[in-house]
Amino acid sequence: MARKEYAFYPGCSSQKGASASNYLVSVESMCKTLDIKMTEIPDWNCCGASISYAEAGELPRHVMNARNFALAETNLPGQDIVATCAACWLGARESKERLEHSSGLMADTQTALKEAGLAIKVIPEVRHMVEVLIEDLGYDELKKPVKKPLQGMKFAGYVGCQTNRPFGIAGESFENPMYLDKLIETVGGEAVKYDQKVTCCGGALAFSEPEKAQGQIKDIIEAAYDGGAEMIVTPCPLCQANVEVYQGQINKRYGTKFDIPVLYYSQLMTLAYGGSAKDAGLNGNVVRARKLEEFAGK
Amino acid sequence: MADTKTAAYICKGCEIDKRVDVSALVKTATKSGKMNLVREHDFLCSAEGVAMIQNDIDNEGVTHAAICACSRRAKTEAFNFPTIAMSRGNLREGVIWIRPDTEDARETTQEMAEDYVRMACAEVKAMQVPPGNQKTGTVKTLLVVGGGMSGMTSALEASKAGYKVVLVEKTGALGGWAGKLYRRVPTREPFKAPEDNGVADMVARIEADSNIKVYLNATIAKTDGAPGRFKVEIAIESGGIAQEDIGAIVQATGFSLYDANKLPEFGYGKTPNVVDQAGLEALAREAAAAGKPICRPFDGQPVKSVVFVQCAGQRDASGTHLQYCSGFCCNTSIKQAMYFKDANPDIDTVVLFTDLRTPGNGEDFYRAAQNKGVIFSKGVVSSVTPSGNACAVKFKDLILNEDTEAQADLVVLATGMVPNSGPDLDQLSEANRQAEGGDEAAKEQVVQLMSKSVLNLTYRQGPDMPQFKHGFNDSHFICFPYETRRTAIYTAGPVRRPMDILQAQEDATGAAMKAIQALENAGLGKAAHPRAGDLSFPTVRLEGCTQCKRCTVECPFGAIDEDEKRFPLFNESRCRRCGTCMGACPVRVISFENYSVNTVGSQIKAVDVPDEFSEKPRILILACENDAYPALDMAGMNRHEYDPYVRVIPIRCLGSVNTIWITDALNGGYDGVMLMGCKHGEEYQCHFVKGSELGRYRLSKVGDTLKGMNLETERVMDLEVAITDIATLPQKINDYAALIKSFPPSPFKGF
Amino acid sequence: MSDLNQEMAERYKNNFLKEIEEQAEMGEWVKMCMQCGLCSGSCPTNFHSGWDHPPQEIFMLIRAGKREEVLNSEGMYMCTSCYNCYVRCPRKVPVTHVMHGIAEYAYRIGRAPKAQPTLHLSKTFWSNATKYGRVNEVQLTQSLYFKDGVGAGIKKGLEMKDVALGLVKAGRLNPLEALGMGHKCKDIKGIHAMLAKAEELEARNKAAKGKE
Amino acid sequence: MTSIVATNQTILVVGGGISGMTAALEAAETGKQVVLVEKNPYLGGRTVQLYRYFPKMCHPTCGLEINLRRLKANPRIQVLTLAEVTGITGSKGAYSVSVKLKPRYVNTNCTACGECGKAVQTEIADAFNYNLGKIKAAYLPSSMAYPQRYVIDPSIIGTPDAERAKAACKYDAVNLDDQEEVISLNAGAIVWATGWQPYDASKIVYYGYDRFANVISNVEFERLADPHGPTGGRILRPSDGKEAKNIAFIQCAGSRDENHLRHCSRFCCMGSLKQTHYVQEKYGDAGKSTIYYIDIRAIDRFEDFYQKVKANPNVSFVKSKVARITEDKDGNPVCNGVDTEGYVRYANAHDLVVLALGMEPSVKGVEIPAEVMSDSSGFIMADPANAGIFGAGCATNALDVNRAVQSATAAALRAIQVVNKVARAEA
């Protein structure tokens, strides 16, 4: 019997072979060590993400999330829904709030759900993986399993937007949240100071208007370098992808020489907990984190 | 009065004894100070030291004491002997703390100390314990002029404190502006909706209050007398006159809206669809009474769109219209917009403003209006013109940065407040002057101006309260909003400063407080602020008076009238004890028991002036006790050194400086005289209003005297000093001393 | 002019603010703006060309009844959903959502600017996500690249080649997904039925508003 | 043991700032017995930490001097410093109040000669100067401090420094055994005048008050401009002591913001307009001020003041709430935002940024140890039932000095109404 059980909402990007599959891998390893049981919500669906705003109406968006609520509630009763993806967490939480605050919206949602043979009684809590780590376990608990502290490694904790605004992590400020830095320090790394911690990576604009988004990504990476970071760490799949995979194009566009690995907090923790490069999904990094690969090898 | 027994007490504490020869000081006090009793003490302000002095008072019959220790500003709790005359010789802040502890300095420091001992002795001998004003009036009834929100509040609050009130209202009903309102701006949490104007309730409370006597359709025909004994004649409805004995007065005569007819560019008068804020209140009341929506005056159709034009004829830097902001109009327009939105959310209500001014919880009211759908646009209106049955409003949208136009069934102009503050006294006295010269137009003007008079005071200095900026009767002082220029008369509410109802009620309560305080103190013969509690009062030797009228003209508080024989007639309880009259008097017949030509003059004479060969000049400093003296004191506390040849005498006000002091000093061989007074001019700091200015004016005349004496005119210097000039003042003194030393010694030494 | 646009324009006559309040998600917040400019200043893309109207100006334009200017604006599509404006607004206006709402409305009544790349992404993303219930990243990227025709698609595809290859190597982009072998939900039928109902209800609700 | 003479005809005034002093003086000068309680070791409150007042540009210490003279001349006022009201029981006309007195370690023998200050070595943060400087641990808070008695900081009690202070005093004024005590006293009416505090600037994170040395608060700026402040009146920026000649003033820092203070603090617009005069005063045409604002709230005749500042070519106005402050390579704070009049985006570097922090009550309504009504911001509201506890000054509303004093004068009368009633009943 695991000490904690949750209804897992991995989200589209964290599936096998998807853009954040290495996030999933490392989260699984991390949870194993921490004895956290994550049961995937059966047949969960996409949250709609913020970007669907123009096409999706209000109700359809909420209905998509409502379906996940209903599935979680019926199949994994009493368990909080835990998302690892910022967008999934935000989308689901927004829907939960709106549905709970508007009886009209809720009624329509139930009507629509009926079409899929589902219904909502009580909407479960919607939480982010980081909340589980910090609130349900706490930094001390997270420190205990550390076998190989990431001594002398410098990371820029890049929180970005949607794990931070509008909900954020309890007790953290929107403009300068500290939890990511604390997580880095918990596993023995050094969190550098830099001023782009919560700057937007351009989000979906990275696809639609790369030239605009890449300007912002450049600022973020530059600041991280200026701060003396060797690697960037983030809790968000979209941030991870945007900041990592466009470095080549940015170098072309701006004549920079960026080559900085961008990792998930879960990858650091897995390694500090003694996990292998594979456990940590390091092979999933486009910009190879060689220093960590060596570290994992030792 | 009991026989005089003088004593000097010399403190050795705070290293005074290390820095100066105290036994020599004792000798000075005895010999040249001629004190009957002289004692020294190691620690004079200690319980033991104080007990020693008290014992001398109780058992040795000491009536006059010169305390030679620290500054008069220090240790006041210890040296507190109200039954005797007391002076303070400032040996600490004034001598040892502003001099270096060196052998070279020892001699001059000693001389300085000895002089201050002599001066303290001389001063106290010239003082008496003030017996208090004999001619007090003890009437405890309050007169409130004006029956609006402010006046009613003053009346009710004063009554609640147990005082009788006479309330005079010129119209047929109490309520004033507030009475005309359909609703008023909310005064309590959550500040979201207009509330009842509250007038009916107050009127009921006043009618039920046996302490309050109300005169409607009545005005003040004449106000004679002084605090505690005003005789007020009230012209009443019947045409007759009612007499009331009054102790103090609150003037709450309110405001009138700025005349919208002066704003033709905004279409006022060209179409009935343009109204001012009063006009809108009237429409709202009619509509409510008729149970109908607010309608368009032009054709009686229900209003579907309304535009509010803020700052109409206000905040006008050009000076054509009102230069100030009336403060209340933003909230009023918001409230009026709500009249429409609350009745029918589909009515378009637009407020055009340049700065929306909703201080404090007004921000909640602003938000509430937005929530109700009132639209706020930052824009400047250029014109309002009739257009069909409605109006066209042309304005520049400052946010979208474009000229645009809006159609509105109704346009409301927020025109602001003009105080009902009576005639401008300067204008009036000028008109009077010309009228006496036989100028017919001026006579006309006098009549016209007098017709606006509110109080009809019989004061030598005019029938009403002096006006401050823009015709309002506000106080000039930030720390003392009730520091008025007519003792025991206080203005309250919008007549003294633009304000909303809530502020006006607060203000009216404060004014009632001050009025009550003033009549209580007048009854005890005590001075009012800023010398609150001072029992002295000016006495005049009429036999010496030359009827030059300077005192009656210059008194900043209108305390002095002229009797039928044209002699000055002092109304002690109007007096604020500044001494301006004393300074003005060329024949020196005016004095106070605790402050006179002699208390200062004898100090000047007491200073030992070395001969011309000594190379020890003497410089007299007359320092204003509110700014300059504290600054010098703190210079001492901070151990800023200055020249050892200066001798400082604190004075109440530059206005109290009688030129005889200066001429005596120069004749006595002083090499220079430095006067330190506070800021004058528009932003004057003088709490006796024109005191420092008058003092300076008189000084400007001293130049001729100096020439007559063949002395350099620079020997008399006037310095404007602020209380914060702690570090700079010593430097200025030293610079001046250097200048004086560059002159040959005064030829008058040794005469 | 689309029929729906026509209908709305007539229904709300010259009261564009009311139109937005009733038809656009969160539109009722527009009136609460006090024009401080914090949202505009906080927007990470506010300096880009094409950022013709920042949020606060959009709000002011709505109040000023400038229907065409607002509905045709590119402004809303500059939103990266970073929520800076949302958390900072001193009036607590959910700016991000209001902008999304206006964008959705403009698009719904057929007034959104044509060929707006982010709008295109939004459409593509939603249809992709709802087709199988989960996003098929390869097809998503493809449909994005080919939005301007095959030629442009190949060109962009080449530009993005390295990016794509990198992801493939890292096992984070599965070419097979292109053949529709990606992830999907089991109950796709249910999802589609559910969404159809939701759209029907939403249309009904919006249509009911603003009628005298 | 401190003993206080107080009856049900006594008025207790809590707070010795300008509002509290005014209420106390007005009541006492009307013949009432007053106990004045102040938590600082000196009277005067926040006004004495201001360099100048708007609109006259006069000095607050001038008014303080007069008020202190009134106080010294009035035997009816008993002053308790280092004192805080901890409990109020009873009811209108008959309150029983407990007051906690912190030790000063210096008794009334003190002559303010300063020997203890010379003897002590430890330096502590200078609270009077908002901790912008350091002072000895035995100190006189300011030259205008009343009571004019030194204070020994608790931090050195039990250390040799404390003994040094004691040894240095010839007058047996240093009492190291001084203990905290709680006294109780009667009062018929209470005037609550605990004033205001600047909003905690670090909560407005996007302005980086706690990250950037050159982002300071409006109250701190007053000390920088004051000749008796930590820089001797030179406007030097904290990071490198460089003369700050290009200064930004950010209005509504906390005010008019539902994430911070929901109310408008009223005084800050005029405060910043006033502070542009300081810049002009020090640097003439070399000094530049920029005011970032939403609405300039220069109400009533203050408009004149605003117009004058507006006419000054060295002062510019930008209608914009600054969105974010960053720091450039030279440590200059950079204001980022959009000018809403015409939508011009800006990123302006300044030498120094002054946040016009809003006003919140020092003691919020709910924290007052008695039944009082207060609004959503914690300001005391008049109680329609009219109990015997009355707010005065900035405890009741965001007010400028002038209005605070009006409010305090009104509060004095309300208190007098109660004690007069008691007097009539007891007579």
Image (cartoon, coloured by chain):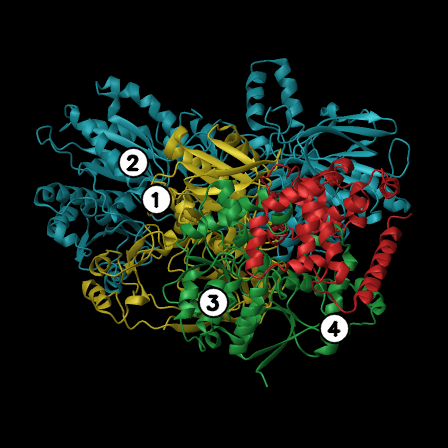
* Residue highlighted by disc 4: A71
Chain C drawn colour: red
Mark 1 on the same chain as mark 3: no
Between the C-alphas of marks 1 and 3, the distance is 85 Å
**Type of amino acid at the residue the image marks with label 1:** Asn
Foreground label between 1 and 4: 4
* Residue highlighted by disc 3: A268
Q: Give the letter of the yellow chain.
A: D
Q: Is residue B438 above or below residue D294?
A: above
The part of the image, by quadrant, that contains residue B597 is: top left
Foreground label between 3 and 2: 3
Q: Report if the CB atoms under discs 2 and 4 are less than 8 Å apart.
A: no
Chain B drawn colour: cyan
Can you see residue B746?
no
Q: Position of residue A240 (x, y in %)?
A: 55, 57
**Type of amino acid at the residue the image marks with label 2:** Leu
Pointer 4 chain = A
Between the C-alphas of marks 1 and 4, the distance is 94 Å
* Residue highlighted by disc 2: B622
Between the C-alphas of marks 4 and 3, the distance is 32 Å
* Residue highlighted by disc 1: B594
Chain A drawn colour: green
Q: Position of residue B491 (x, y in %)?
A: 59, 41
Q: Report if the CB atoms under discs 2 and 1 are less than 8 Å apart.
A: no
Between the C-alphas of marks 3 and 2, the distance is 79 Å
Mark 3 on the same chain as mark 2: no
**Type of amino acid at the residue the image marks with label 3:** Leu
